[in-house]
Amino acid sequence: MTPDERAAAEAARGFMPPDEGLALWTAASSADPALGPVLEVGSYCGKSALYLGPAIRDSSSTLYCVDHHRGSEENQVGWEWHEPDLVDPHTGLIDTLPHFRAAVHHAGLESIVVALVGDSPRVAATWSTPLSMLFIDGGHGVEPARLDYEGWTPHVAPGGLLAIHDVFPDPADGGRPPYEQIYLPALESGLFTEESATGSLRILRR
Ligand code: SAH
Ligand code: MG
């Protein structure tokens, strides 16, 4: 990453510590564009996209960013990760899409990033393109995590990467669903092997 790219990603709003972001960038840089595009589930205000996008800037690859931009359960009013200024006064609902779009624009990534605005399982239902890398950081409840595992991981191409965020083997560190519904099933499927762990980020290869 160039110093400018790194500064932009670190300044962006969201939930991606710098060391995990760099690990994400390193993984995406090593993904083979010939296997297919890169797709992330859960973009929020674009922080992780600002690590993934620069990694494929010089390739012919594309970064698809799936998010309904209405926030996860924990982002809603009264929950731990609620940010009041993200509520659209006209609808009373969270809307992170304008923030995502501005971040992607300012990082010069508009030609690389394709936003898919909608419910993740619905987008996955008709997706058929093999992926060189899949990054899952969407809804962290049991059901959303399970649906993201079922809907998206079959699309990781053989030789491709599966990155999972917020994997906490110790319940004292955080919520369990990404660990129990995505990380463990991926390993237990026998299709994926672990390549690296940085903080709560796990990189697996198919
Ligand atoms: N990767 C981001 C953080 C993502 S937060 C960063 O680096 O900062 C989780 C995101 O998942 C939220 O933006 C939320 O809107 C999205 N999300 C949760 N459930 C979803 C679903 N069913 N479909 C689409 N997006 C969903
Ligand atoms: Mg996360």
Image (spheres, helix red, strand yellow):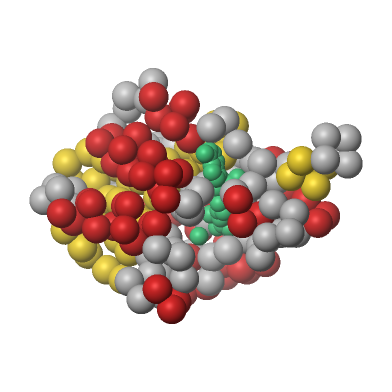
Residue sitting at x 11%, y 51% = 190
Answer left or right for 96 relative to 59. right
Closest to the observer, 1 or 45? 45
Answer left or right for 21 relative to 105. left
Residue sitting at x 40%, y 73% = 171
Q: Quadrant of residue 172?
A: bottom left
Can you name the residue that lies furthest to the right here? Answer: 89
Closest to the observer, 61 or 117? 117
Can you name the residue that lies furthest to the bottom here? Answer: 172
| In the rendered image, the vertical position of residue 78 relative to residue 57, given as above or below | below
Answer left or right for 100 relative to 128. right
Can you name the residue that lies furthest to the top here? Answer: 126
| In the rendered image, the vertical position of residue 92 relative to residue 27, given as above or below | above
Residue sitting at x 31%, y 38% = 150
Q: Position of residue 121 (x, y in %)?
A: 44, 32
Q: Position of residue 169 (x, y in %)?
A: 33, 71
Closest to the observer, 76 or 34? 76
Q: Position of residue 191 (x, y in %)?
A: 14, 47
Closest to the observer, 40 or 118? 118
Can you name the residue that lies furthest to the left here? Answer: 190
- One can see residue 6 in this view: yes
Q: Quadrant of residue 95?
A: top right
Residue sitting at x 40%, y 29% = 124
- One can see residue 106 in this view: no
* Tally of marks: 0
Q: Position of residue 54 (x, y in %)?
A: 50, 53
